[in-house]
Structures are given as structure tokens and as C-alpha cells.
């Protein structure tokens, strides 16, 4: 153990090793080895967030490669076995639906067999039956945050998937089963790190703040790519240290992390209260470790945040590249005229109206990323015409895209000129993107009992197979 | 006139959940912070991002030399009309602002 500035206290420091910001992103094996050598009381890693968009939640599937996730999970399961401490993953499989938890359990089960490990595995489920959320809404137990999309109880019942974000109480319940591995569904990024220190009586403000700082692994250090950090929470504060020898945590790198993906850099809302870091003091213990004191936990009503995804249609895309200078110069006029032609053709030949579908042409090279907000005007060498076809029914988007295909390839700027031919970068020109989802909830659900909206199951797994231990 | 990127170390933008974006302007020094913070009008940033000024939250953090803006996403992340899933391009718009 390195020297620490923690004051004498009956609460010893709880050490949590965080290998990276998310499973699937990668971490330095050397840094993980340093963490194992130094020791810890728990290994915690996040499995996802809403960051990549609504598709993962809509489908209940991981966005990351299974092979990569399994390889990283193998390294963490070996580290766990070497240390004899619990290993926790939160928001398993990117979105943390029950299906994603079971996907992660399947990977764990395969690895237990391959590594010859016998394990007690707790699964914490966060999926919410939409009809139960609708009932809660009727009962006045669901409140919108700002800003929140408009949604009725009937609208909620039609959602593809709904999850609630667990906090520390549910993770603590999973740890209390004596699990070697906890596979948690959707939970807050901080909950899996703060749960054990809080269970052991550490300073609540320090536990939540330390968890927030460590949630993205080495992102709070000078070498974000190395991944692994260790956060240690005691009776008055927390300390954070990167595990890669070349990395350093400085008061600046640590305090700046409160800005990251946080609308309010001083306040963080969690189930059962909020963290206030206004009074936090960041102090360098040496060239690479930082100690923080003065953060406060402010208890409040027990609410959990809800996330939901709604199926909004089916999408097929096409891409054509305009290179001829005259077309590049007049690309906006060309796109507007092409759009009008496509709408007329779809109406005449497919009998579809505006309520059935939508065609949007985005001009890559002009303003595809910013749209109307774009302020820079230039003359690009080429312009990509990205044609997004969205339709209410699965087959329609593909039909419309096939209809659009020859127009997108040959549409002239004026009626009396030879037909141009643009560049299609691949064949077939259309790309079916499948179902399209949108985020539909930014609400909180009030709970009398933190476990009321969550489920816990425990299994004993090992090289010889699966045995159900208990279901809580 | 200098652009914001010439006066600062880094401007970063990212979603803060699917419904908000947050933009951090890292000025890099007391001097740069003192030059940038008063010159950067909240109303002007709101116009640049197409957001109503009263929905713009601003945090001036001298200790970090940071000016931070948080605001509702003009389009919800990943919805049909979203053009930038992670919201990072708001930073480049701001970097090119003439101060």
C-alpha cells in the first residue's frame, strides 16, 4: 500500500479498481497488472450508456463486439480470481436491458468453463414492463425532467424497451448475496463504484464524488488511453491514482472531469439525493495522486431515472457523390429539385403520402453535420448526397429507395441537358438500416422500496455447468 | 479579429444525456480566461446554437479557466433529424466564433 494522507479513522479506505470507462473500449494490460499488484476491494466497470444513441436500448443489444467484450471480461475475471474480490459490471451490454444482462451472463458462463472457475453470479435486472410504468404514470409516480419528451401512459405502453437506472442500494443488494460477479442491468455510472464504500460507512459525498471521477477510468488522468485507475474512499475524502506508471492524476485533470458529459459541473443527481461538489478541495498528494475532500451528499426523495426507446419506423439510405463542378456549385438547387421529383414519383407509382414516409437529402461537404446552424461557406471539391428514406412499414423504405435509385444517379440540374451520372460508391446503392428508434423518456419514477422496480437472481456456475442457487 | 480557437486551449462539446449538450471552453490560463469570459456573450452563443437564450445555462469556473454552456439539444439525440449523434460538432461552431 502506498502512503496515504487519510486521517486516522475507524473507517478504513475502500479501494475500487476501475479498468476503463466501458467494457469493449480497451485498457492497458500492464496498468491492470499494476492494479492487481496494488490490490483492491472490488473491481467495477461500466458496460454502456445512452451515448451511442437509441438503437441499443430499442433492440436490447450491445453495440460492442462480443469477441472484444469477452476478451476484456476474461482479463477482468482472471484479475478478480487473483485478488479474491467481487467484480461488478453496470449497464451490461450497452443498454442494460434484461436481454443485455443475459448476454453478459452467457459470456461469463462460457469463460467460467474455459477458465475452470467456480463462481456465484448475481444478475440485477433493470427492465421495466411498459404497462407497469404506464400504471405508475397514472398513479402520479412518474415525473418529467427538463427537458422531457411529451409522452402519455398509452405512449409508454407502446415503447420497445424501458429501463430504470439503479443506484447504490440495488448494487449493494446484489453484493450482499455474496456474489463473486455482479452483472447489473441499467444503473447510474457511479453506483457500481460508490456502492461498496458507502456500504462500509465511507463519507457519502466522497464516495459519490470519487465514483464520478473514476467512472471513465483514466479519463481523469493525463493518459486517458491507459484505462485503469484506483479510487480509495475513506471517512473524510477520496484519493485517485492511475495504474499506468506513465499516467498522472493532477488536481486539474481530476477536477476537470466533473465537466465531462455533465450539464451541471457542481451537482450530480442520483437515486435518493444529489452530490454537491461546490466545496470540494483538490490537493496533489504527489506527482500522480490526488486527494479530494469537501464534497457533500444531499439526501432527497427516492427516485430512479427512466429511459425508454420507441420504434419510429424503418430506414434505408443511399449515397451519391457529385464531382462535376457545376453540380457541386448548385448542389442545393439540385437536391431541392430532386426531392420534389422523388415525392411526386413515390406518390404516383407507390401511392404513398407524406404520412407514410419521409425523404431527406443531406449534402455532405456543405452542411450535413450542422444543418441550418452551419456558418462556414466554402467550395468543396465534391458533395455527397446522403438520401435518408424513413417509412412507417419495413418494406416501404426499401421500395422507396429502389425507386429513388435511378433518379439519384442521373437527375439533371435542368430539363434540357444531357443526363449526368454521379458516383455511387458501392453496389447495391441502397443500405437497409432496419428499425429506427428514438429516446422517449427523460422521467423519474418514485419508489418506496429501492428494490421495487428491480429483480435479483443468483446462480452458481462452474466448469461442469449451471446450478440455480437462489432467486430473490 | 481573433477566433475563439486562437484564444483558448481547447473547446469540447458532448451530449449530457440524450436531451442536453454541454460545451466546455478550456481557456488554459488566467489571462485567456479574463480575455474570453467577458467577451463571450451568452446571447450570442445561444444564437449560434439556435437555442433560446433563457434555456442556456452558463458556468464561469475561473479555477479551471473554463467557461461552460449547457443547453437542451435542438434535436433529441438519435432522433430522425439528428445530424450528430454525440453532439461534438457544436464545439467547432464555437471555435470559429469571431471574438
Image (cartoon, coloured by chain):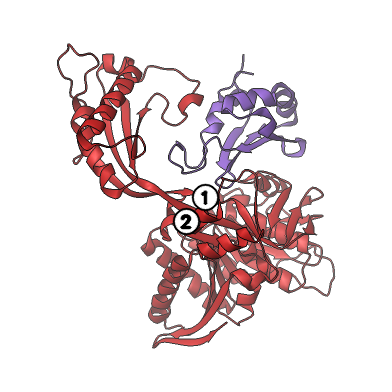
Chain colours: A red, B purple
Question: Can you give x and y, in whole percent of width and height, for residue A211 in the image?
Answer: 67, 60
The residue pinned by badge 1 equals A440
The residue pinned by badge 2 equals A159
Quadrant where the C terminus of chain A is found in the figure: bottom right
Tell me the quarter of the picture where residue B23 sits: top right
State whether residue A306 is above or below residue A321: below
Q: Left or right of B74: which side holds A61?
A: left
Q: Determine crowd level at label 2: few under 14, some 14-19, many 20+ residues with C-alpha closer than 10 A.
A: many
State whether residue B7 is above or below residue A44: above
Q: Left or right of A299: which side holds A435?
A: left
Q: Left or right of A48: which side holds B29?
A: right
Question: Can you give x and y, in whole percent of width and height, for residue A98 in the image?
Answer: 48, 68
Residue at image point 60% right, 82% down: A178
Number of numbered discs overlaid on the protein picture: 2
Residue at image point 45% right, 73% down: A105
**Residue furthest to the right:** A8
Q: Left or right of A51: which side holds A5?
A: right
Amino acid at each position: 500500500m502506498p502512503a496515504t494522507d487519510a486521517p486516522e479513522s475507524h473507517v478504513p479506505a475502500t479501494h475500487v479498481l476501475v479498468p476503463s470507462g466501458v467494457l469493449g473500449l480497451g485498457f492497458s494490460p500492464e496498468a491492470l497488472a499494476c492494479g492487481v499488484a496494488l490490490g483492491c476491494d472490488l473491481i467495477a466497470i461500466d458496460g454502456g450508456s445512452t451515448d451511442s444513441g437509441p438503437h441499443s436500448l430499442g433492440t436490447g443489444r450491445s453495440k460492442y463486439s462480443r469477441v472484444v467484450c469477452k476478451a476484456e471480461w476474461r482479463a477482468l475475471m482472471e484479475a478478480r480470481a487473483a485478488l479474491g474480490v467481487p467484480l461488478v459490471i453496470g449497464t451490461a451490454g450497452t443498454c442494460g436491458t434484461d436481454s443485455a444482462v443475459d448476454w453478459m451472463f452467457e459470456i461469463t458462463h462460457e469463460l467460467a468453463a474455459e477458465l475452470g472457475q467456480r463462481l456465484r453470479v448475481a444478475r440485477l435486472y433493470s427492465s421495466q414492463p411498459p404497462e407497469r410504468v404506464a400504471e405508475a404514470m397514472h398513479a402520479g409516480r412518474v415525473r418529467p425532467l427538463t427537458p422531457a419528451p411529451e409522452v402519455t401512459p398509452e405512449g409508454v405502453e407502446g415503447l420497445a424497451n424501458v429501463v430504470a437506472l439503479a443506484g447504490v442500494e440495488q448494487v449493494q443488494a446484489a453484493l450482499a448475496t455474496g456474489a463473486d460477479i455482479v452483472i447489473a442491468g441499467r444503473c447510474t455510472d457511479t453506483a457500481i463504484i460508490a456502492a461498496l464504500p458507502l456500504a462500509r460507512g465511507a463519507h457519502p459525498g466522497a464516495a459519490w464524488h470519487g465514483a464520478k471521477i473514476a467512472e471513465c477510468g483514466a479519463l481523469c488522468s493525463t493518459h486517458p488511453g491507459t484505462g485503469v485507475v484506483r479510487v480509495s474512499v475513506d471517512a473524510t475524502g477520496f484519493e485517485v491514482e492511475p495504474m499506468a506508471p506513465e499516467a498522472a492524476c493532477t488536481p486539474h485533470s481530476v477536477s476537470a472531469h466533473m465537466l465531462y458529459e455533465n450539464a451541471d459541473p457542481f451537482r450530480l443527481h442520483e437515486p435518493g439525493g444529489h452530490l454537491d461538489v461546490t466545496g470540494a478541495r483538490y490537493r496533489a498528494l504527489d506527482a500522480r495522486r490526488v486527494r479530494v475532500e469537501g464534497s457533500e451528499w444531499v439526501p432527497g426523495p427516492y427516485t430512479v431515472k427512466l429511459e425508454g426507446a420507441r420504434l419510429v419506423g424503418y430506414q434505408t439510405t443511399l449515397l451519391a457523390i457529385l464531382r462535376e463542378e457545376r453540380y457541386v456549385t448548385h448542389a442545393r438547387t439540385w437536391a431541392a429539385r430532386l426531392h420534389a421529383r422523388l415525392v411526386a414519383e413515390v406518390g404516383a407509382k407507390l401511392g404513398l403520402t407524406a404520412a407514410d414516409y419521409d425523404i431527406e437529402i443531406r449534402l455532405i461537404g456543405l452542411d450535413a453535420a450542422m444543418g441550418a446552424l452551419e456558418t462556414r461557406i466554402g467550395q468543396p471539391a465534391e458533395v455527397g448526397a446522403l438520401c435518408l428514406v424513413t417509412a412507417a412499414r419495413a418494406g416501404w423504405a426499401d421500395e422507396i429507395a429502389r425507386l429513388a435509385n435511378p433518379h439519384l444517379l442521373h437527375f439533371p440540374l435542368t430539363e434540357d441537358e444531357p443526363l449526368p451520372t454521379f458516383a455511387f460508391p458501392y453496389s447495391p446503392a441502397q443500405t437497409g438500416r432496419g428499425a429506427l428508434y428514438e429516446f422517449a423518456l427523460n422521467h423519474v419514477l418514485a419508489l418506496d422500496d429501492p428494490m421495487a422496480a428491480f429483480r435479483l437472481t443468483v446462480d452458481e456456475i462452474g466448469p461442469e455447468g449451471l446450478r440455480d442457487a437462489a432467486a430473490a | 479579429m481573433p477566433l475563439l480557437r486562437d484564444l483558448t486551449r481547447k473547446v469540447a462539446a458532448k451530449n449530457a444525456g440524450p436531451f442536453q449538450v454541454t460545451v466546455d471552453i478550456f481557456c488554459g490560463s488566467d489571462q485567456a480566461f479574463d480575455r474570453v469570459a467577458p467577451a463571450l456573450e451568452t446571447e450570442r452563443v445561444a444564437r449560434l446554437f439556435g437555442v433560446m437564450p433563457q434555456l442556456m445555462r452558463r458556468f464561469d469556473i475561473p479555477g479551471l479557466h473554463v467557461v461552460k454552456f449547457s443547453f437542451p439539444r435542438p434535436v433529441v439525440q438519435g432522433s430522425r433529424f439528428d445530424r450528430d449523434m454525440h453532439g461534438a460538432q457544436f464545439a467547432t461552431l464555437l471555435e470559429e466564433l469571431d471574438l
